[in-house]
Image: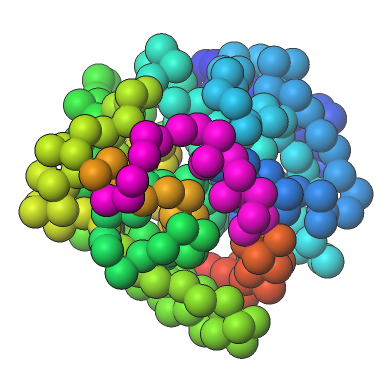
Amino acid sequence: MKELEEAVAWLRERTSLSPRVGVVLGSGLGGFASRLTDRLEIPYETIPHWPVSTAEGHAGRLILGRLGELPVAVMAGRVHLYEGYRPDQVVFGVRVLGRLGARALVLTNAAGGINPAFQRGLLVLISDHINLQGANPLVGPNEESLGPRFPDMTEAYSIRLRQIARETAAELGIPVAEGVYAAMLGPSYETPAEIRFLRIIGADLVGMSTVPEVIAARHMGLSVLAISCVTNMAAGLAPGPLSHREVLETGEMVRDRLSRLLEALLPRIAAEVAGS
């Protein structure tokens, strides 16, 4: 993994911060990064080998800083398979965060709601996923320095971290739900028939990201928590066509709520993984 090591070495030349928790912020959900102090913001295009975000609503910056005393690394924006990137490029940032020292990863994304009990703007803790992207970042020769050839995915999303997230949200008065996330390739939105299929096989949410990053993180032994923002109801479940503008508008609507949750949650996650 020469490219990975070169990126990590480049970053270590510029900062001594060793993040304990990594955060990935999805479409329209980038507000949390402004809450960090002693911030070092680095555009992705300046980091060796780091793929550049092209999707609207993704800032495309790595932000290293502190949340109180907690060292944190934030990816403000991600890249997707639908942008034409290879699976190993899609997870490059997550692997860098792991190499820099993060032992837990918190991912956020914008998702379409399939579960009829969900409504626009709801935050949903992902309990499991269904990978329908036709790709896996671990395909090819295994890099033993990253993890085992056949990583277990029984608990891809930490039960304990979800419990901590539920408790923290309740203290803050922020409603949260739990659900299964289906990952599609995109970039076209799903058809109503596809959404009916996804509901039949057990999906509560649908999106175009997150799953490759979770696979790579678990391969490296990181504990994972993922939070979806229901930015719209999926095709056929609400009147009118779907649009990315609605996704960004809902992200703006929930940004403060999500930021408050992350601000309270990250120190508790760091304490949990430090003691495990």
Q: Residue furthest right?
A: 38
User: Horizontally, is 127 left or right of 105 in the view?
Assistant: left
Front residue of this view, candidates 195 and 12: 195
Considering only vertical position in the picture, is 130 above or below 273? above
* Relative image position of residue 132 (x, y in whole percent): 20, 35
User: Horizontally, is 45 left or right of 223 in the view?
Assistant: right
In the figure, residue 13 lies in which quadrant? top right
In the figure, residue 48 lies in which quadrant? top right
Q: Residue furthest front?
A: 239
What residue lies at 55% left-to-right and 24% top-to-bottom?
A: 55
Q: Residue furthest bottom?
A: 171
What secondary structure is the stretch in magenta mostly built from? helix
Count the marks: 0
What residue lies at 21% left-to-right and 59% top-to-bottom?
A: 154
Residue 209 makes an appearance in the image: yes
Residue 220 makes an appearance in the image: no
* Relative image position of residue 199 (x, y in whole percent): 15, 53
The magenta region covers 237-255
Q: Is residue 245 magenta?
A: yes
What residue lies at 62% left-to-right and 32% top-to-bottom?
A: 57
* Relative image position of residue 27 (x, y in whole percent): 56, 39
Front residue of this view, candidates 269 and 82: 82
Q: Is residue 93 magenta?
A: no
* Relative image position of residue 189 (x, y in whole percent): 32, 30
User: Horizontally, is 57 left or right of 177 in the view?
Assistant: right
What residue lies at 37% left-to-right and 34% top-to-bottom?
A: 241
